[in-house]
Amino acid sequence: DAMVIQNPRYQVTQFGKPVTLSCSQTLNHNVMYWYQQKSSQAPKLLFHYYDKDFNNEADTPDNFQSRRPNTSFCFLDIRSPGLGDAAMYLCATSVRAFPVSPLHFGNGTRLTVT
Amino acid sequence: AQKITQTQPGMFVQEKEAVTLDCTYDTSDPSYGLFWYKQPSSGEMIFLIYQGSYDQQNATEGRYSLNFQKARKSANLVISASQLGDSAMYFCAMREGGEGADGLTFGKGTHLIIQP
């Protein structure tokens, strides 16, 4: 089955130690997104790629970076994680087409910062 | 201003009853899509149902239906014959624009608990 896969499912990192979360997709969708979801809150869009074009949300901290080396893979890099970055990180994909279509989410990576 | 408003932080419903989860939205774009997602405690975001702004009929998917009232800017989710497995967070979300490249804007969610 075509799907969105996030690894790892759980990630523990130390305060200030860089961490990378990964996402892969077999849907061949041209748009990939990273969302941050803190406990009991709605998901918040960090950035997205339309093909290789990177689109950063205005309020996404500089501490968060992303890479998309090819259509299938996208990475979220947190350069110096703080305690406030502990959250569920959701990767999603979609096509850019009319009419609008749903986003397909991975299972998420739950990040703990110690 | 909030683009998606879900006014029910939590709901308790008896098993087998129908439940309506409220959602209102705000946009000036004539082309948009409205979505409902279910998020169990395990964390994955599961797509349930979609309504396009130009769709004439309300969307239905199995036990899920979307009560779309465009003039009122509401898109309520109706779950018929609720089951224990329906207990989860439910998010209403919107994608704006003809091609919707900017992703989803989510409401704050409704925590639904189905009681036996």
Image (spheres, grey):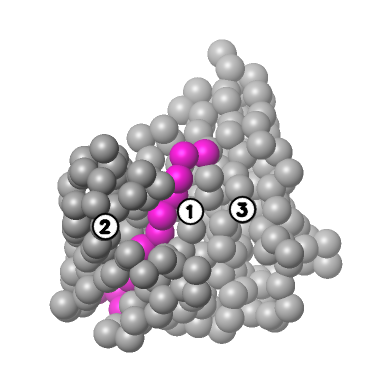
Which chain is disc 1 placed on?
A
To which residue does mark 1 refer? A43
Which residue is painted at 50% across and 82% down in the image? B99
Crowd class of label 3 (few under 14; some 14 to 19; many from 20; radius 10 Å): many
Identify the image quadrant of residue B17.
top right
Image location (x, y in percent) of residue B39? 45, 41
Image quadrant in which the C terminus of chain B is located: top right
To which residue does mark 3 refer? B107
Reply above or below: B55 against B17: below
Would residue A88 be found to the left or right of residue A3 on screen?
A: right
Which residue is painted at 66% across and 36% down in the image? B9
Which label belongs to residue A78? none
Reply above or below: A98 against A93: below
First to last magenta residue range: A28-40
Which residue is painted at 59% across and 44% down in the image? B109
Image quadrant in which the N terminus of chain B is located: bottom right
| Three-letter code for the amino acid on which mark 3 is drawn | Gly
Q: Label 1: state its secondary structure.
A: loop
